[in-house]
Amino acid sequence: MSYSSSLEKAISSIKKQTYLIQRSLNKRDLMSALKYASLMLAELRNPKLPPKQYYEIYTLIFDSLSNLSLYLIDNHPNHHHLADLYELVQYAGNVLPRLYLMITVGASYLQCPNPPRDEILKDMMEMCRAIQNPIRGLFIRYYLSQTTKQILIQKLKDDSDNDSNLEVSMNFNCQYIITNFIEMNKLWVRLQHQGPLRERKQRTKERKELQILVGSQLVALSEIIDDNFTIYKEKVLPVILEQITQCRDVIAQEYLFEILFQVFPDEFHLETLPLLLDAMLHLNPELSHDKLLWSLVERLNVFIVRQNEGLNAVDGMKEDNLFKIFWQFVSKLNEERPDLSLQQTIGLVKSLLNLSLKWYPESVENLDHSYELVLQKYQDLGDDPVPIDSECFLSDLILLKNIDIHEKDRTNTFLKLVSQSDSYRKLLSLQRLPLQQDIINELLDAFTMGFFGTNSEANASKEIINSKVQLEHILSMCEPIIKSRISLLTPKEGNNNITEDEAQDDDEQDETFIILDANQEKLAKFTHVIINSLNNSEILYTVEKQMECLLILKSWYYKGGSNIKYTYPSIITNFWKLIRKSNKLKSRLPKKKSYYDDVIKKLFKHISRCTNDLFNLCGNSYTDAIYKFNLQSASLADQLSLNEISYDFFSQAFTVFEESLSDSKTQFQSLVYMAQTLQKTRSLYKESYYDSLIVRCTLHGSKLLKKQDQCRAVYLCSHLWWATEISILGEEEGVTRNFHRDGKRVLECIQRSLRSADSIMDNVQSCELMIEIFNRCLYYFIHGDESENFLTIKYINGLIELIKTNLKNLRLEGDDEDLMIDTAVQQLSRTNISNSQFVQDIDDTLNPIFMGEDGSYIELSKLKGTPANVSSKISSAKMSNLIRIPIRHYNGTREYVMNQSEIDDRFKVINI
Amino acid sequence: MMKSFFKAPLDIEILLDNEDSRKHVHGNLPLYEDGESINGIVTLRVREGKRVEHLGVKISVIGSIDVVKKADNGTNEILSKKPLDQFLCLSYDLCPTGELQHSQSYSFAFKDLNKRFESYVGRNVEVNYYVKVTVLRKSTDISKIKKFWVYLYKDNVSAITTVSNSLSTQQQQPTAISNGENAGPAEENGQSTNNHNKVADPQAKQIKLDIGIENCLHIEFEYSKAQYSLKDVIVGRIYFLLTRLKIRHMELSLLTREISGMKPNTTIKDTITIRYEIMDGSPVKGETIPIRLFLGGYDLTPNMSCNYFSVKNYLSLVIVDEDGRRYFKQSEVILYRTRE
């Protein structure tokens, strides 16, 4: 009997035979029908069909044989006896068609009343051994199982009235399916080893296509067993596991375990875990145990989740310590298989974590044990560097990536791990530095999110650092970050193994640049978040506790060396916050006044310590900030009327100024800042702290390098003798009488600065400064009595004359270059057009130039989007262009005065 | 041959008793067995108005072994046929010399006729049985033959009784005849019908063989018995102990061997009577393949043996590898006819 040469021909042949069978049956010509059937079945002998095509013709034939089977059943025993037919079909010369016919007749017979059921079933199974070709064998056995499935179920039903019969039946059925399963699996595995070696891949593909046939046997088994656990555990599982382990085939082992997990109930797995895991120990070494374990754990996790949702009590398993069983498995596997890759171990441990987190969410111990396994493996690897591709698995493991866990639980778990699991910390600390930093960064992000809470829901479950030890643990974990340096030269590359020398280099580079360092920024953020979380927590954290936390943070950050310039500000600002909080508490709880006074003093001391550290470790690059911290602290102390402390901070600020602020520009800025701060102080009048401070400030101003800086600093310092109202303190101009004002000193300052302005060689600068001084004078003139401030109208008008003269001289100077200026000034005096328009009108070719508060030139670009050019000297600019600066300024002031004089009579005396 | 040229003056009709109800086999010949009487009626019909003188009418029953030469071209056309041995020839006169004027019938009977051999039509040899009526005349005798077919059954009551006590005896059996040649009992059986009991003995030992090609194939096979009735089922199994061959399939054939002629000029003719595929694909070490072959549906020849020829049956296990090479092992089995 031959088969068709192609799939198409085979299909059409099958259709033709099917038709002929049906026609013969209609004529009750069974012999012909059987003849056609065996012709049709010859198509299944084709050895060239790949599994998919074979399956296609198999299904066609299956349908055709089903029809035949119906006829056989309907006409038994009137037109034939199926027992006879069972023998008759066995005369077929070819074994494959013979067996298909035999099974068709046999299965039909079994559906008729009172057949010799067990004998026929066994016989069919036994005869299937004749097919040793993997694909054909798998299909005939699949056919056997398809046709007998209902019969087996019926058999159970028939015997269900009698317990002992039922048991016998159940045993028979299970053995029956298991036998078929084992034989199918053998054939399936054998397929891998057939054909030439170069077609191995093809074989593997074919096997995957055929796997469902083997898997279907386990499905059938689970349907038969239903909820009969005893037989599963005693009769079924051991045999299946034995087959799986014995076949030593990776594909089969992976697939069958997977199916086993899927088709049988979770309760069964829970009860037979030792069996399952023991079998898994004996699998092919090439198999990835981690995937297998993962799917088992996933399965059990789904189960526990469902159980928890159903609020059903979980049976004994939980007490039996499921985790321990799994842990023992993994550790045993690790022991027995030293060749397991780190990656595999990681996979296995990941399953452990996954299991523990779902089943024992409270247990840190389990997690610790799990990480211990990885740690062990890691250490066993010795000096071999961990391959880069394994690193990401490690990092995922440490960060609990790909494990289904609620975000808040994740943070909570991290917190527990960091503070309670030695293995976890150790493992982390063993990683390559850049990797460690990446991981720590992510952990910090998690903590930050966890403590801070992004929404109301998270708020409810905000995590709290509940012990100093915990904080210490977190910080010790963060050590690599605390100490990390960002490399300026190669910012992309890892900067591990920084030697001291290199660190030194970094320090030097840092003097000139302040670079944003994401790591340090994160630490700073972390500081804020922690203190904030303590503040908002339900449990009341005393100021002292918070201070202790800050001190812990501070001492850890201190290890970062010059990095404290990034981290200390967060600590200092939090100290400030605490000071304010203490002050508030103090006023609320008068009884505890002395306590809080004490606390506040301590806090200031810590701030002072911080600024000292900063000063000592960060060098010159950071003095400006240190100076400002001092001033800010001084201001705060002043607001709390702690004049001693305030004075101390001011004096520290002066020390910084005098010793370290060498840049003239910064010096000027610093003095301005100092003056601003001092001007608002109120508590320093006692013991003439204030006077000594402001005199010193003014003195420094008058000693600045550049004349223009001197001039500006001094006229700004004049305000130090002219206190103004701070409404928040209840002061009011005209009401409050005891403002610290000294008009004589003000005049002295103005005159000192005028002298400086006058002595400047650059006429434009000089003129501009005079106009600025004129503006100051106007301020004092308007805001105080002549008797008080000594700035008389005569003085002012004199100043105006001086300015006018200077402007005229300037104009003459400019005439040489550009006559246009003259007309421009005249134009300006007549009209009200704005400055910018004015500039455009006169000269389109030049960029407009302005002067900043500190005397630097600002050259605006006419091109949109181009940044302005700021510098202290402008070399390229034409004189005529520069002259416009004071002219513009003067015109502005004049305009103001003229406008004001219309509504305020005092302005009328100004002769402008 | 000559008869076709001359019209015979009388017709001879031989009618066997109960012929219509008797079983017919092998080209519609009535079937007899050993020891069965052959009775019947001979009718001589004279043509209208003719008278036939004769020297007597004789009836004989004849069993003979004939040598046949057949064309080797597959048509099986008989080229020549000559008797080798007439092992049975009984005759007696139905009537004395006289004259037949009208049709006349004579009954005849060969009581409890002993038939030594089965009827057989082989490649070189035939065993034929017939009843012959001869009307002796002065001129050419007129004769007519009627062929019949003979089966020798080798089952009887004792065979069934031995089944009941088979357990004890069966265990003794292998040691008892383990030294004997397979062919031994077969020849014995064929020679005499008196040995029925021995032949039908169901305790015939099973065939078990261990064969192989070094480092390539090693199998062990067994057939449940060495002797089978024609209605029997051959059951057995094959164990693969080693397979390095890529086997395409395996089949079981039944080979019928006819040995004829006297030594040293014996002719051996083999005929493959059954070809039965028993395995598809290549098994691995440790596999067991079942064998089950129903014989009842085939037209088989039981073993026979006499001085002039013998018929033997062999089971041949054939393994065909992927390259089409065939490996086989033959083992003799004895087939015998039983009534059921």
Image (cartoon, coloured by chain):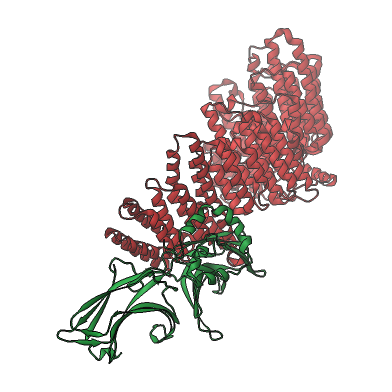
Chain colours: A red, B green
Query: From what the image shows, is residue A178 above or below residue A269?
Result: below
Left or right: A78 with respect to A60? left
- At 81% from the left and 25% from the top, the residue drawn is A651
Q: Quadrant of the N terminus of chain A?
A: bottom left
What x and y, as percent, mark residue A450?
Answer: 63, 30
Residue A669 sits in quarter: top right
What x and y, as percent, mark residue A672?
Answer: 72, 30
Which sits in the foreground, A422 or A609?
A422
* Count of marks placed on residues: 0
Residue A771 sits in quarter: top right
What x and y, as percent, mark residue A591?
Answer: 72, 7
Left or right: A505 with respect to A266? right
Q: Quadrant of the C terminus of chain A?
A: top right
Residue A196 sits in quarter: bottom right
What x and y, as percent, mark residue A882?
Answer: 65, 44
Which sits in the foreground, A385 or A542?
A385
Left or right: A353 with respect to A259? right
Left or right: A84 with respect to A904? left
Query: From what the image shows, is residue A130 above or below residue A173?
Result: below
Q: In this orientation, does residue A714 appear?
A: no
Which sits in the foreground, A286 or B332?
B332
- At 79% from the left and 28% from the top, the residue drawn is A610
Which sits in the foreground, A770 or A528?
A528
Q: In this orientation, does residue A383 appear?
A: yes
Residue at the top extreme, as displayed = A591
